[in-house]
Image (spheres, rainbow, N blue to C red):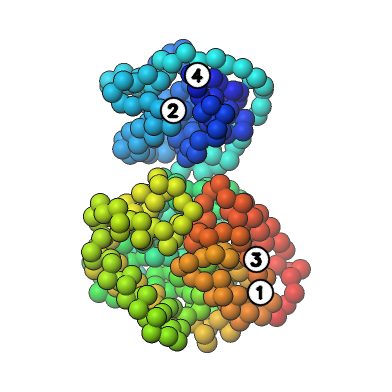
Amino acid sequence: MPSGIYRFGEFELDTQLHELRCDGDRRHVEPQVFDVLSYLIACRDRLVTKDELLDKVWGHRHVAPTTLHTRIKHARQAVGDDGGEQRVIRTVRGLGFRVVADVEECGRTVMSPAPARAAVAEQRIQFCTAPDGVRIAYATSGTGPPLVKPANWITHLEYDWESPVWRHWMRELSRDNTLVRFDQRGNGLSDRDVADLSFDAWVRDLETVVDTLGLERFPLLGISQGCAVAIAYAARHPERVTKLVLYGGYVEGVLTRASTQAEVDEMTTVTRAIPLGWGQDNPAYRLFFAARFLPEGTLEQMRWFSELQRVTTSAETGCRLLATAATIDVNELVRQVRVPTLVLHSTGDAVQSFAQGRSLAALIPGARFVPLESKNHVLLEHEPAWTRFADEVHRFLAEDTDCMPHR
């Protein structure tokens, strides 16, 4: 990517600080949109073809045409442009794009390009079959020792890969490891029309994926309800799990642990809202649902999170998956965990309270607990909590297991 500062009209694009400023005020721009804008401005003296832009920003992996269209649209919006007048970015139909604004380059320095965005060039999606005949889609990305992530509620291997909500997770977790993740039965690229959506079936699907890949010993990364699946697997197969990383998790689902009618009513409200708003462009529903997971997210991030529901599963299956998660109970299993464990939890998490994370850590002998200053259930790329999460996880996974205290 280019390195320097570019001025055009009232805008200033600072590629060293990764900032877009308008009259001195910083404007929020999603990372991939910033990369598109930076590359087009750096190549302002010529036409940039679609293929070139895809190669320079996304590498050699497949990208849907709608993804490029969306990034160009948001890049235009960021600099006050639009598809009609095209005062900054002009589309040359059938060929590509060109910056037509007057651009002044200043303060250019020679810097080595940051490798972080190129660290994950592609993912490989394959399928395996669970004992009951359900096809499970799984993906691998990155290189190095395996890191296995059990599925959490509503995922889509391909859609998550491009999402501003999840893509930084995939990139970072694939930096030093071969990340293995899969779509839960009933959603994503796995079979959708499934009879058994029980918790035991979720654990069996994890068993199926790791057995298909021939993995013998590996760490598990649980996120949200995936923590309970990771705990159950570690308790059943202690000889195969080297470490546990648990983020945003809980031991008991909301209905299992409910002690008041208000807690039951809250769950009922959520499940009733799903059939009403699932798959519909309903701003009120989108705000209600996305705000629970991403209260500090941008409008684009909330839109992506809302769209995830449309492409992942049906309203009926979404309710069934949520009902299973609500009745999770791994109280007995968590006490059997004897592997080095790192537990992280956002202090302001509205989906799974901070107290749930503390309780989880307290039940695992010797577990290390890390509070993260965030209100988001899914950590976003530009918040300090994400940086700390990534640092803690990388450090924990790199530690010599043999030197850790035995329990």
Task: Say which quarter of the image contains residue 153.
Answer: bottom left
Q: Please identify, in this view, whether the residue under mark 4 or under mark 3 is nearer the observer.
A: 4
State the SS at label 1. loop
Rounded to the nearest angstrom, the CA distance separating label 1 from label 2 is 48 Å
Q: Earlier in the sequence, mark 4 or mark 3?
A: 4
Rounded to the nearest angstrom, the CA distance separating label 2 from label 3 is 39 Å
Rounded to the nearest angstrom, the CA distance separating label 4 from label 3 is 44 Å
Q: Which residue is located at x 49 percent, y 62 percent? A: 377
Q: Which residue is mark 2?
A: 79
Rounded to the nearest angstrom, the CA distance separating label 4 from label 1 is 53 Å
State the SS at label 4. strand
Foreground pick, 250 / 131: 250
Label 2: how many Cα within 10 Å (few below 14, some 14–19, many 20+): many
Type of amino acid at the residue the image marks with label 2: Val
Type of amino acid at the residue the image marks with label 1: Ala
Image position of 26 with respect to 164: above or below: above
Q: Position of residue 335 (x, y in %)?
A: 58, 84
Q: Which residue is mark 4?
A: 8
Label 3: how many Cα within 10 Å (few below 14, some 14–19, many 20+): some
Q: In the rendering, which numbered label is found on residue 370?
A: 3
Q: Earlier in the sequence, mark 4 or mark 1?
A: 4
Q: Earlier in the sequence, mark 2 or mark 4?
A: 4
* Residue 301 in sight here: yes
